[in-house]
Image: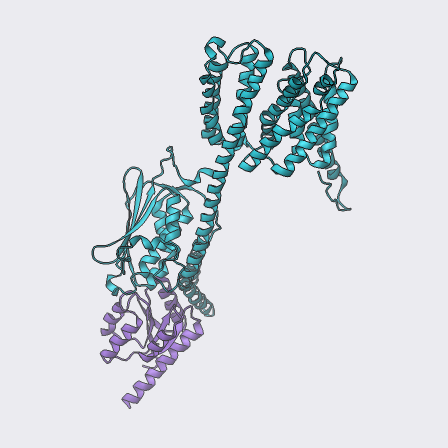
Chain colours: A cyan, B purple
Amino acid sequence: MTQAVVPFKTATAPVASDSLKRAGVFVSQVALLAGTYYLAARLGLAFRFQNSQISVVWPANAVIVASLLLAPRARWWVVLVTVSLAHIAAMSPATPAWRLAWQIVGNSVFATTTAVLLSRYAGLPLHFGSRRQVFTYVAISLAMPALFALGMPSFVRPLLGLEPMYSPSAALLRTALSNVIAMLLVVPVLLLWGQGSLRLGRLTRRRVLEAAAIVASLCVVGFVAFGTDPRFAHFPALLLWFFPPLVWAAVRLGPAGAVTSVFFVALLSTLGTARQLGPFVMTSEAEQVLSLQLFWIAIGPPILLLAAVIREREQVEDSLHDQRNQLAHVTRVATAGELSGAVAHELRQPLTSILANAQAGIRLLDRDRVDLKEVREILEDIVRDDRQAASVLARLRLFMKDGTSRFEPIAIDTVVRDALALSKSTVELSAVEVQTSMPAGLPRVWGDPVQLLQVMVNLVVNGCESMHLTPQPARRLELQVAPLDREHVEVVVADRGVGLPNGGEDRVFDPFFTTKEHGLGLGLAIGRSIVNAHGGRLWGENNADHGATFHLVLRAHHPNGRHATADRHR
Amino acid sequence: MADMPPLIAIVDDEQSVRVALHRLCSAYGMTTHTFSSAEKMLASLDGRRPDCLVLDAHMPGIGGLAAQAWLRERGITIPAVVITGRDDNELRDRSIAGGACDYLCKPIDADTLIGAIQRAVAAAHMAAGRRSA
């Protein structure tokens, strides 16, 4: 927490309440940490080997590592002091002081060095969303507990012959594994939930249903594999049935969903095995525990890695999506530049009327007898013309809107009308006659209104410009909107211009292909990429006689239906 | 004849511009007829001939320049002020060459427009005076 710089003359009351609030947050965080550590340590003790100091899993160390990773480094001492006190509280009063001290120092050194290594080599925050981070994390999670186990009393004392009833190598393996499990299974859950990566409030209903289905299938598999008699459950293939729901979670719910599901599987398998059910029920308890641990280590990292790979792919898709939107924006600005002459022309009409009306009005007011009725009519006309000019500017501004994309249900006939309004002057200056046919009751389409407007403006302007050699009475642009089938709406734009290059009709969609003297040659290329992102199609063909026809097919939007479009991440 | 206010024919396809120019000319004491197309104006020439045309250069159908050519071919001389939304030197030259008295870009200030109309009417009167003398 950084100290806010407070100017001298500020009233002290809000400052006092501010620092009070901060102190409150601090105290509650410390209390939460102490409580969590205490519970984790008690849980670890509950999963202890009989007659041993070593646990199946030592989640308390996971709590320290996760807290260090979440807290700023300047506060690490608070974390270490808090967990040390909680450690003393959690351990049995019979534990000798030297053993407690050894454990506290050992745990602190382990957690601190692990946190430092993770922040240096895996990179913070740990989001488990990249392969590199997951690899580094798993490597550190395997190596550090092994080194840590070498320094703990459960290994050192039998080695020195002080506790001869235990084998030092078995103690080493168990201490190492219980911390490996803590690192692989518990820390990711604590971190991802602690960082708020789940943003439960932002989950769509669909995702919540999927998560529920995953939990349900894990429960079913868990019951069959770990809730049945060992004689039934000993089929090794039963364990493989955990993979479909785990893979599902990794693919659809991201790293947070994946680590939580793995943790859940660990929980189910522990519950079953503790009741002497499932495949890991063996004569020796040590073997039983080892089986569980090896099972968890086998499922954890691959699922984490899968979630990371999927997340990376999603991020690549997202960045492509952003780039396409930015490119669409750039070409839109370029188109607006090309339209600007025509827009200026369009503004001249209302400006001409406004000026003439206003000057006529002033002249009328100079007369002896003022006809107020006429003056009112003049003022009303000025208002109307001014609004018209403002709407021209508003359309242009909307068109130049920033590069973000927003999908919504839109009426395609409105898009066509707006496109004609935006290119009105271009159409008039090219002396093109526009014929539109738009039946009533067209289904809506699901898309970005500005980007679809851009596509339509491009088609209209291209159509007009292709006709500059066509004799004037024949310069006709036909626009038709019609439902293609239940799922699609088609917009057809037909001109009587020079047509498309013969045999290479699709080349007009290549970037930088242009037949115009000015223009980037990106209009149709970006148009097609916009339409593809809408799950639609855009193509052109030559007419039998003159000119070309462009077809734009878009998916109809059914309010309760699915729309498998590129706005998946929005 | 000299006391009679001059009759101005305003030809513009934009209704709002037509009405506004009509008001302006009326406020300056001129009598105006408005036409939404050159064709309608040309068809009306059987009645009282206007003393001056205010012609929009760009209209669907016959534009300002074509209307001037049409009048010239029939030996009808009515002074014309061409108004346009495009400041285009080539169009200006062609308009002046076609006999336009003035070529004005929209939006047009009242003084400029009224001055141009008055000059055009006066020049026509002088020419008519010379012819009748």
Give percent across and percent down for residue A540: 29, 52
Looking at the image, is A367 positioned above or below residue A96? below
B121 or A542, nearer to the observer: A542
Relative vertical location of residue A119 with respect to residue B112 in this rendering, above or below: above
Q: Residue furthest left?
A: A545
Position of residue A520 measured from the top left corner of the image (x, y, whole percent): 41, 59
Position of residue A236 measured from the top left corner of the image (x, y, whole percent):
47, 16
Query: Which residue is at the front of the view, A173 or B126?
Result: A173
Left or right: residue A82 versus residue A544 is right
Residue name at image x 29 percent, y 54 percent:
A505
| Residue A229 seen in this snapshot | no
Query: Relative to residue A339, is residue B133 depicted above or below?
Result: below
Q: Position of residue A214 (x, y in %)?
A: 47, 24
- Which residue corresponds to the image point at 60% horizontal and 25% vertical from the top-left? A186
**Where, by quadrant of the figure, is residue B104 drawn?**
bottom left
Residue, far bottom: B133
Quadrant of the rendered image containing residue B69: bottom left
Total numbered labels placed on residues in the image: 0
